Amino acid sequence: MPFSVLKVSERSYLVPLLTIRAAGFTATVDACARDEGQLWFLSLLGSQQAVRALWARLVKGETAYLSQDELTGGSPCWLAREAWGTWHFYGARLPSSSAHHGMLVPNLAVYACDRQEFLLLARSEEEAPALHYRFLNRRVDLPLHPSWAAWLWERGLNAGEVNALESMGVHAYRCGPGACALQEDLSQAIQRGRLPAATECDAIAEREAA
């Protein structure tokens, strides 16, 4: 897949699961990312009919309801308006089970998306900086080096260019890089010795590989 997210078999079910329902259809939510009522990512488990029906309702712009169980009313939710446009649906039958797994992923989470802003879906907090570097490097016209990944991640958080979403089963972040501010911060960091220049990083890597 052109984005990074946990497989169902890799998730820990120690985390309480949610239930989503709309138009009489119900499914289990094993992972999601949201900002208040807006859904930025959704992973569903249930019958194939229910999973596909919920997908169809959501992409039409209809409201669904998320709750801790099937008995409570739940809170309204809908697909994020800012991510409106292309939403990808990935579905598969689970091995040795009649259950169906479906994921709704906005185009913003796809590595090859042409928009400068992006949605980061990481399997862990530790994976996020390297994944952020990979997406960022494709979207800004600046010479970035992989060894700067941790610095770029911390800078993005401090500058408000990386914002964590309320997530379950995945670590999700909305990222809106500012190329001009990034270029200025990079120049200052290199001049002050906080970061080695890209040419120095390559020279170090060549020496270590020799």
Image (cartoon, grey):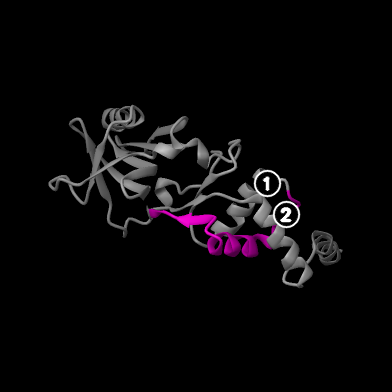
Looking at the rendered structure, the kind of residue marked 1 is Val
Q: Find out whether residue 111 is within the magenta segment.
A: no
Quadrant of the image occupied by residue 23:
top left
Disc 1: CA contacts within 10 A as few (<14), some (14-19) or many (>=20): some
Q: Farthest residue in the left direction?
A: 71
The residue positioned 59% from the left and 53% from the top of the image is: 132
Please state if 189 lies on the left or on the right of 10 as rendered. Answer: right
- Residue 205, compared with residue 179, is above or below; it is below
The residue positioned 29% from the left and 29% from the top of the image is: 57
Would residue 168 be visible to someone looking at this image? Answer: no
Q: Which residue is mark 2?
A: 144
Q: Find out whether residue 152 is within the magenta segment.
A: yes
Would residue 5 be visible to someone looking at this image? Answer: yes
- Residue 157, compared with residue 48, is above or below; it is below
Is 104 or 96 nearer to us in this picture?
104
Tell me the element at label 2. Answer: loop
Is 71 or 145 nearer to us in this picture?
145
- Kindly report which numbered mark, 2 or 1, lies closer to the viewer in this rendering: 1
Percent of width and height locating residue 206: 85, 61
Quadrant of the image occupied by residue 38:
top left
Q: Spatial distance from mark 2 to mark 1, Cα to Cα?
A: 9 Å
Q: Which mark is residue 130?
A: none
Q: Which residue is mark 1?
A: 140
Contact flag, marks 2 and 1 (Cβ < 8 Å): yes
Please state if 131 lies on the left or on the right of 206 as rendered. Answer: left
Tell me the element at label 1. Answer: loop
- Residue 32, compared with residue 188, is above or below; it is above
Percent of width and height locating residue 199: 84, 60
**Which part of the image, by quadrant, shows the N terminus?**
top right
Please report the bounds of the magenta region as a residue range: 142-166
